[in-house]
């Protein structure tokens, strides 16, 4: 039995941190579901930038809309939703078997809206309606503006994947926004069972401090932050406030580990997957890390519910001069900027491809 199956059997959901029309068409995604216990996936602007730039799989669909008046953004969302509907249907049995706890796919609102709560709320509602699938999350960044958008979207019944969380405090703010949305639904007499996940980014911490800390602290910060956050997650689920919501029919906002591929070439390629093994959580895994863990990953135990040595480790980083709160904010801002950059490049490449396909079609028509 492979390591991915072992992770799944200990109670962690494994979602692929990738999507492309190619892996849908050639059966790769279905094989990962069948052989590697993949029960969902996530997408983001960077993933789709690579998918569209590196493949001709979208050319026919782009060509069909090349002469239309729709914006490149609208064309992109049409292409992405076509993919994600197919993926959502593939994972629908997982969704049904777990009463909606698993089997999800995710689509992000435009990263350009990260600081515009009202526009994010509108976009989330529109994308959810267009998807026409119960197991599609709309991704909203956990920024200050995002907190309002999360609460309002949950209140409106839109399932939300809160993205770009980097610290325990940012996670707690996202959880608070989710709870407020659910509590408002209960007060309004609405069904409180609106799903959500909170995505904590892990490996970027270690990249950020790699050259600033002694060797004995390398590749330890992201895991320590995750352990602190896992403790807060477990405490929230055990709280009287949450028990009250559960009794009213609410479902827990699950904690999701993101950015779990190893960036340091001198470190184990399964380092994060091994350290982040924990029941009732989700790991969104890049393909390379997934295949590596299936091959030689070992599940040696679960992350400690009390956070283990997290506080001691974090104190060591503070003593080494790392301002954890400031770095968490910086990482969130850089993450949002990176997605915005990918978004711009994605739409620009789509414009180029659309123009080329339109020109080619016109040339072929003229040559007849």
Image (tube, rainbow, N blue to C red):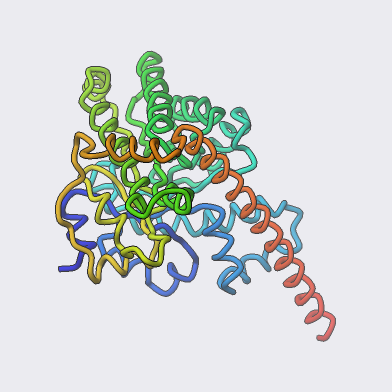
Q: Visible in this render: residue 2?
A: yes
Query: Where is residue 201 shown, x and y percent of the image?
Result: 42, 46
Q: Tell me what residue is drawn at x 33 percent, y 67 percent.
A: 30
Count all numbered tags in the image, as a single digit.
0
- In the displayed structure, 57 sits above or below 11; it is below
Q: Quadrant of the C terminus?
A: bottom right
Residue at the outermost right position: 366
In front: 142, or 325? Answer: 325
Q: Is residue 41 left or right of residue 35?
A: right
Q: Tell me what residue is drawn at x 30 percent, y 58 percent.
A: 271
Q: Tell me what residue is drawn at x 57 percent, y 71 percent.
A: 54
In front: 245, or 313? Answer: 313
In front: 147, or 181? Answer: 147
Residue at the outermost top position: 187
Query: Where is residue 145 shown, x and y percent of the image?
Result: 56, 28
Q: Is residue 282 left or right of residue 145?
A: left
Q: Visible in this render: residue 284?
A: no
Query: Where is residue 310 shown, x and y percent of the image?
Result: 27, 38
Q: Tell me what residue is drawn at x 49 percent, y 59 percent.
A: 83
Q: Is residue 124 left or right of residue 311?
A: right
- In the displayed structure, 74 sits above or below 86; it is above
Q: Quadrant of the N terminus?
A: bottom left
Q: Would you identify the image quadrant in which residue 87 lies?
A: bottom left
Query: Where is residue 277 shown, x and y percent of the image?
Result: 23, 50
């Amino acid at each position: 039995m492979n390591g991915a199956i072992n992770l799944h059997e200990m109670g962690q959901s494994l979602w692929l941190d990738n999507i492309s029309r190619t892996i849908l068409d050639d059966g790769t995604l279905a094989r990962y579901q069948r052989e590697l216990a993949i029960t969902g996936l996530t997408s983001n602007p960077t993933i789709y930038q690579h998918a569209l730039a590196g493949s001709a799989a979208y050319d026919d669909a782009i060509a069909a809309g090349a002469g239309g008046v729709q914006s490149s953004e609208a064309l992109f969302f049409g292409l992405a939703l076509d993919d994600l509907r197919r993926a959502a249907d593939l994972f629908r049995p997982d969704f049904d078997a777990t009463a909606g706890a698993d089997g999800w796919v995710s689509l992000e609102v435009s990263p350009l809206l990260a600081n515009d709560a009202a526009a994010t709320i509108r976009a989330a509602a529109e994308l959810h309606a267009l998807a026409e699938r119960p197991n599609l999350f709309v991704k909203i960044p956990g920024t200050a503006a995002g907190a309002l958008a999360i609460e309002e979207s949950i209140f409106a019944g839109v399932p939300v994947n809160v993205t770009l969380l980097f610290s325990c405090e940012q996670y707690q703010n996202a959880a608070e926004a989710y709870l407020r949305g659910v509590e408002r639904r209960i007060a309004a007499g609405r069904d409180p069972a609106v799903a959500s996940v909170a995505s904590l980014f892990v490996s970027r911490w270690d990249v950020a401090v790699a050259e600033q800390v002694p060797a004995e602290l390398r590749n330890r910060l992201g895991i320590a932050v995750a352990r602190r956050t896992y403790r807060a997650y477990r405490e929230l689920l055990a709280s009287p406030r949450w028990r009250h919501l559960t009794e009213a029919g609410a479902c827990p906002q699950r904690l999701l580990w993101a950015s779990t591929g190893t960036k340091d070439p001198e470190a184990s390629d399964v380092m994060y997957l091994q350290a982040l093994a924990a029941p009732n959580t989700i790991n969104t895994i890049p393909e390379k890390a997934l295949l590596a863990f299936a091959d030689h990953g070992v599940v040696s135990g679960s992350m400690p519910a009390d956070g283990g040595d997290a506080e001691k480790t974090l104190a060591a980083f503070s003593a080494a001069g790392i301002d954890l709160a400031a770095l968490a904010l910086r990482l969130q801002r850089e993450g949002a900027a990176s997605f915005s950059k990918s978004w711009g490049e994605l739409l620009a490449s789509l414009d180029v491809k659309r123009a080329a396909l339109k020109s080619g079609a016109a040339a072929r028509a003229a040559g007849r």
